[in-house]
Image (spheres, helix red, strand yellow):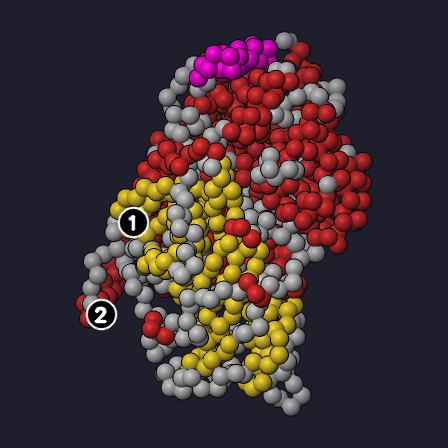
Amino acid sequence: MPPQKDRFVNFIVGPSKGGENHHDQDGEIHMAGVRMYTAKSTPCNRLAVAIAVIAVCLVLILTACLLVTLFARQSTQCSNLTSELDGNSAGDKDVANRGTQEPEFGPITTPASNGSVGNPHPRSFRLPITLKPLHYELELRPDISSNSFAGAVVIRFQCYSPTRFILLHSTELDIADSIELTEVGQGDGRGAGEAPGLLTGEPEFFTPYAFMKLQLDGPLKKGHIYSLKIRYHAKFSDKLMGLYVSKYEANHGKTKYVVASFLSPNGARLVFPCFDEPSFKANYTITIVHEQGYTALSNMPEEKRVPTKDGLVATHFMTTPKMSTYLVAFIVCDFWQESRTVDNTRFSVWAREEVFNDTLFALEYGTRAFTFLEDYSGLEYPLPKIDLIALPQSIAAGMENWGLLTFKESHMLLDPNEASSDTSQEIATIIGHEIAHQWYSNLVTQEYWGELWMKECFANLLAYLALDHIHPERNMMDELSLATEEFLRVMLLDALPTSHAIQGTINDISDILNNFDLTSYYKSEAVVRMLRYLVGSDVFQSGMTKFLQTHAYSNAKATDLWDALSEALRTDRGTRINITDFMDPWMLQMGYPVVTMTRDYQTRIVEMSQEPFLLHPDAINRLPSSPYGYQWRIPILYSYADQLAQPPIHVLRGTSGSLSVQEMGTDQWILANMKRTGFYRTNYDEANWDLLIKQLREDHTVISASNRAMLIDDAFHLATAGRLSITVALNLTTYLHKEREYVPWKVTLQLMGYVARMLSFTSSYGNLKKYIEQQLLPVYRDIGWNHTDSHGARLLQGEVLKALCSYGNEDCISKANSLFKNHVEHGKRIPPDLKPCVYQVGVANGNSSTREYAWEQYRSGTTGENLLWLASLAGTTEPWLLCRFMERSLDPSLVPVVDTVEVFKHVVNNPIGGYLAWNFFRQHWDIFVERYSGGIFLMNGLIDTVTKWFSTDFHLKELREFIAGNELSLIGKAGMKNFRQAEETTAVNVHWMETNYEDIKQWLEEAVSGD
Ligand SMILES: [Zn+2]
């Protein structure tokens, strides 16, 4: 679109004053209403702080002296860890350093031959560090009628080294000619107003890196502060990134709109020209000019509302603390709101009127989680307010914008009487996650996107801790979190050579988008959880507080975190451990180990060895080289038979080691990785596996539920990797008819889902269904369709019913059908945890009017509930219905673009849907690339979904042909990594069928023969 300069309007922001009334001499800003971070204790003056620090230090020194002598006896874990980790760090340090790949962060200037400042050459997609922003004064004017917005920004920045050009990020913004550059002065305020008019010519754009370059006729001077005013105009995004509009039908058929923003990870450049990298923190003074009758929201509270001459309203917001671009947020809406004051902070929930009743859970749970997380962080929440807003459309479930958290309606709102147990658990986790980010992302921010894991692992971990604190009876940390699909899947993906280290290497923009994956979110959480277990939860918490205090309003790297934890260990326990040495192999190389324990039953010595765990035996040849040689220091928490209360810990270093367990009888089993605290798998000699199977059959409750789940999960994946016979894995499942806990069933049914996909077109599928039914029936008879109060029991009930109906149990299907009929015909309520199963069965067995009913329920249903109806529409044996479903899903007026990806997930779960989805995906590839490949999550999820069922050489060939033909369209975008992953997964599936099919076939025949 050509620039529409006539549409630039008069802005309220002044001519290049750079917010002078806010600045002090250092260019820092005094922020009304913003609390600089403070410890949760009473504020005190500097002298008092100094005295207190000295006093505390003395106490700590004395305490440490005492503890040093006591500690070795007090903590088996840490003393073992100390002895295991100390003493050999010197040699490893060099390796660690070589393994650290800092993202390139240098100037992109090419020095001129005469040594003067040269011209820019965008050799790197990273900004040079010649200039740093201090303050943005930003005004936005959304105009719904023209589907566009106008903006004006005054960026006040400091020059760190002389340069003849200004490089900013700007994407799809029509920049007006009249860019103004003014020198504000030196850091001390001298020289203000000098040297204006340095700019020469038009701005130049380098689209691949989203750069806008402003050439100057003389160099900017080191230490001087400048002010740059830019006016621009842009279309609203149609991809839910940058600034976008959602329209919805309000009560009485009125159409209303919401303007919302989503700037993570690099979408700020779509809304205003800026230094769009997380380490370029600055203060923001924001004004939004909007229609009367609507409310504008941003990160900070409103300062004033002023009517404009053209009949609009200018809402001015207070200045933010120093923060990163990706956390800035803008909303214009006509929503309802409810607030509470929590710890001096105004905590509000926002939603449109029609769904506002469903905000109560977010308010209740959110305020409790907020209080817990603020206490946990040890630092008072720095802003005066925190808003949680439910948006009709959002690319992600939630986004942590500082002070203005945005959520998809379906992931924030719920009706407690109608939401299933897993939905309420998921929403609680998401709310906790985004609130935790207020400290771990917003106050202290990762240096760059390779350190994305830093913010995500803490947000996940703390969301679980918050849920544990609020609902201890659910056992979120020790059990439920180990059965999530994300945790189970990341262990699978990280066993492929296409995985990556948690600490990612960012070589281009597509790496940023692709880094938003399960490794960054969930492997990081599991590995940091392992560390938390080792250092102790109290030391971990005090280390995190230290970390936040040291780096508040700034950026941090992994080493900063390990240093803070090392210091906490030293001050709290008097223990010196180099955490960096322990963590680096987990953070800087991909994959994880398998520990093999082989017992000598005579000498009672257990030999242990470690190797990298890979699902395909050939994958070892495709691993990239690692400075750590794919070895890890592995904390092995083990137990044998009746020694469960105080499991000892041993840290395995190097390729092998041994344990002498003289008290262990030859008929007692040994079990490692108790409570699944370590991120690895364990294999045993065959006799030990037999002892474990025997124990499960005789009395499975002797082994904890999370360990039972882990044994089955490990065994199936060891079999896939060719390290264990599949029959051992199957034998472990034979006790399940006695299992009444959710976690082992959830894990097993997920594994059986994989086996079922692999066998779905073989003659053994019938026996598999029969076997699963055989194991499920006693559970079904026990819990059936009855009401139950416990959270765990309700989760189990939902899983069992869904599985039993999908494997074709007649009684289950008939009861589900009758509940469905009563609901549709007589409006009889269906208990929430039964709905997924009942809707699925009811629609699959219904006629065309049933499907239309389900479709209408999806279109008009309440949030969350409508997604269950969407899932139900994939239940059919008619291919044409699935095709029509996918076609409809491409029409944004029928199915929001985020839900389209959900449609494909459900279609692929239908046994006849895999190939239909793959064909449809290929035919409509251009639409998918255009819609999804520029952002996070959606393209990656879509590719994973449509390829996950591939299991033959033919599929692999088709996949490779498709990738070869379309590789170019994903350059600089999201998705290619997922295609490479899909190739590896398909190869694993092919190999799985080749090596396991005959054994499974025979085993199943025997298992169901007596039936
Ligand atoms: Zn997050």
Mark 2 residue's CB less than 8 Å from ligand 1: no
In the image shown, does 247 or 691 lie closer to the viewer?
Answer: 247
Residue 313 seen anywhere in this rendered image of the structure: yes
Q: Is residue 613 left or right of residue 883?
A: left
Please report the residue visible at 38 percent of the width from the left and 71 percent of the height from the top. 19
Q: Is residue 820 shown in magenta?
A: yes
Type of the residue with mark 2: Arg
At a point 32% along the width and 59% down the height, the residue shown is: 303
Q: How many marks?
A: 2
Question: Residue sitting at 60 percent across and 32 percent down?
Answer: 715
**What numbered label is drawn on residue 807?**
none
Q: Could you tell me what secondary structure mostly forms the magenta stretch?
A: helix
Comes first in the chain, label 1 or label 2: 2
Q: Which quadrant: the C terminus? A: top right
Disc number placed over residue 346 in the picture, else none: 1
Q: Nearer the viewer, residue 120 or 82?
A: 120
Q: Can residue 658 be seen here?
A: no
Residue that carries the numbered disc 2 in the rendered image: 46
Q: CA distance from mark 1 to mark 2?
A: 28 Å
Frontmost of labels 1 and 2 is 1
Name the element at disc 2: helix
Image quarter hosting the N terminus:
bottom right
Q: What residue appears at the point 49 percent right and 83 percent down from the top-left corner?
A: 196
**Element assignment for label 1:** strand
Residue range of the region highlighted in magenta in the rendering: 802-829
